[in-house]
Image: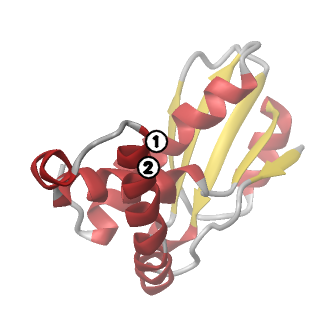
C-alpha cells in the first residue's frame, strides 16, 4: 500500500482550518496564472472573480488530500476496522483501489482502477471533495 498527499482532516474543524489555510496560496496561484496569460489590470479585474479564486482553492485543497493506493485486499483490511460509510466507484472485480479516509465525516471515498494510477488519484481527490468536503465546508457548487 502506498500513501500520497498531505492531509486527511480528522475533524470538521480541522477541515475548515486546512481549507482556510490554502486560500492565500489559491489567490497567489490565480494571480500568477493570470500574469502568465498576460492579463492587463482591466482584464484581470473582469475575469479573475472571487468564484475563480474559490475554484482554485477547492482544487488546491482536493489535490492535497491524503489517499491510499493498494490492492482490493488492502482496501478491505483498511476499511474493516472503522465504522465508515463507504462510497466506492468502479467495478468490484478490479484489483487496484485508491481511497481517502475522511474521518471528519466518517466516510471513505474509493475508486477502482486498472492501470492509470495518477488519473485515479486525481479523480478520487475531486470526488472526495465533492462527496464529503463540499458540504462539510459549506462550499457551494
Left or right: 88 in relation to 118 = left
Residue 11 at least partly seen: yes
The reply to whether dot 2 and dot 1 touch (C-beta < 8 Å) is yes
**2 above or below 15?**
above
Q: Residue at x 65, y 44 (%)?
A: 99
Foreground residue among 38 and 51: 38
Provide the residue designation for mark 2: 59
> Label 2 to label 1, Cα distance in Å?
7 Å
Residue 127 x/y as whole percent: 44, 40
Q: Residue at x 56, y 50 (%)?
A: 63
**Quarter of the image with the N terminus in it:** top right
Q: Nearer the viewer, mark 2 or mark 1?
A: 2
Secondary structure at badge 2 equals helix
Left or right: 94 in relation to 107 = right
Foreground residue among 102 and 40: 40
Secondary structure at badge 1 equals helix
Residue 70 x/y as whole percent: 83, 36
Q: Residue at x 69, y 37 (%)?
A: 98
Provide the residue designation for mark 1: 126
Left or right: 116 in relation to 24 = right
The quadrant holding residue 121 is top right
Q: Residue at x 44, y 41 (%)?
A: 36
Residue 101 x/y as whole percent: 62, 58
Amino acid at each position: 500500500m502506498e500513501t500520497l498527499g498531505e492531509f486527511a482532516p480528522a475533524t470538521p474543524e480541522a477541515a475548515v482550518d486546512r481549507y482556510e489555510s490554502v486560500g492565500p496560496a489559491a489567490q497567489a496561484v490565480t494571480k500568477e496564472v493570470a500574469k502568465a496569460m498576460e492579463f492587463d489590470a482591466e482584464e484581470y479585474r473582469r475575469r479573475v472573480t472571487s468564484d475563480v479564486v474559490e475554484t482554485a482553492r477547492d482544487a488546491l485543497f482536493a489535490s492535497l488530500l491524503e489517499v491510499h493506493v493498494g490492492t482490493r485486499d488492502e482496501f478491505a483490511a483498511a476499511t474493516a476496522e472503522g465504522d465508515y460509510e463507504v462510497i466506492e466507484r468502479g467495478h468490484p472485480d478490479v484489483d487496484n483501489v485508491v481511497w481517502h479516509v475522511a474521518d471528519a465525516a466518517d466516510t471513505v471515498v474509493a475508486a477502482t482502477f486498472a492501470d492509470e494510477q495518477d488519473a485515479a488519484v486525481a479523480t478520487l481527490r475531486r470526488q472526495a471533495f465533492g462527496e464529503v468536503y463540499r458540504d462539510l465546508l459549506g462550499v457551494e457548487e
